[in-house]
Image (cartoon, rainbow, N blue to C red):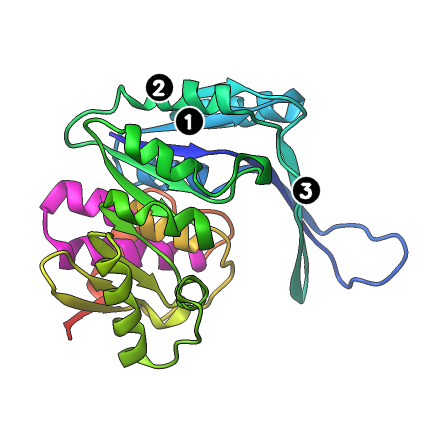
Amino acid sequence: MIWTVTFSPSLDYALEVDGLEPGVHIARRADLRPGGKGVNVALVAKALGAEAAALGFTAGFTGREIVRALREAGLRTDFLPAKGRCRINVKLLAGQETQVNAPGVEIGPAQVEKLTRKLSAAGKGDFAVLAGAVPPKLGDGVYADILKAGRGAEFAVDARKGLLQKTLPHHPFLVKPNDEELSELLGRPLSGEAELWEGAEQVQRKGARNVAVSLGGRGAMLLTEGGERWFAAPPAGRVVNTVGAGDSLVAGFLVGWQRTKDFAEALRLGVAAGSATAFREGLCGPGEAEALLPEVRIERR
């Protein structure tokens, strides 16, 4: 089972228009789907054939629609109620992409404690994924507190700055910054492969067991807990959408690891899933990542 936590799930509203200038526009296409990093991981894991459950917090009519859509997709859901309403994020496609993200729900420490207790149901062989931002009032230590209270499951963390930094002493199984986030985490610009490997090693010395660095259209790097360095080059294709590609990589990696216990093959499936999402509108669907697997080139560095 892959359990995912999304503190601020959303409804993502994508509108395709001819241009973006002041005035009234008629969209050529409109699409409304549930979003949020943990939600994306759960949906892609399900598409890859794994058992997945989406946890977190929802509120209002938007929260009810998120739960309905996820259950319709076959996901197990166990969201806690929060104040306010789940956000609607707007993506305007007019040649270039413009995103407007709304504030999320209101959550207090007591609700986080309830969430932590729910995660105690995750057992040996399961993964719990902590992904995305949290309400500022909760502070940067909330993910670390969840890891500290964790029991049987292994944890994967995909977050920025202090949220990620504070989890490292608790030895998460996987962290997945992109190259920009890795530079941000370490407080210095990293350019070139050698510096990125050095940055991954520094994060590992701080406590992370495995460090995957996503590089967008250039693929991904993986530093394993055994010191192996793997690089995955993505398949060729036309990039249509980058939203959710990194989340798809996380899902593919964890599903691949559960299937094979082989880091190189886990990275291969992760990059295939990320590419499948990038090559279409929406997230990777059933069979799409597997079709790209032979085109993902894996190299040991």
Estimate the x, y position of residue 258 in percent, counting from the top left.
16, 40
Estimate the x, y position of residue 58 in percent, counting from the top left.
56, 24
Which of 241 and 263 lies nearest the eye of the viewer? 263
The quadrant the C terminus occupies is bottom left
Disc 1 element: strand
Disc 3 element: loop
Query: What residue is pinned by disc 2?
Result: 118
Query: What residue is pinned by disc 3?
Result: 102
Pointers 1 and 3 in contact (C-beta within 8 Å): no
Nearer the N terminus, badge 2 or badge 1? 1
Residue 28 lies in the magenta-colored region: no
Q: Identify which amino acid the numbered label 2 is placed on.
A: Lys
Which of 233 and 169 lies nearest the eye of the viewer? 169
Nearer the N terminus, badge 1 or badge 3? 1
Query: What residue is pinned by disc 1?
Result: 55
Q: Identify which amino acid the numbered label 3 is placed on.
A: Ala
The residue depicted at 28 percent of the width and 60 percent of the height is: 203
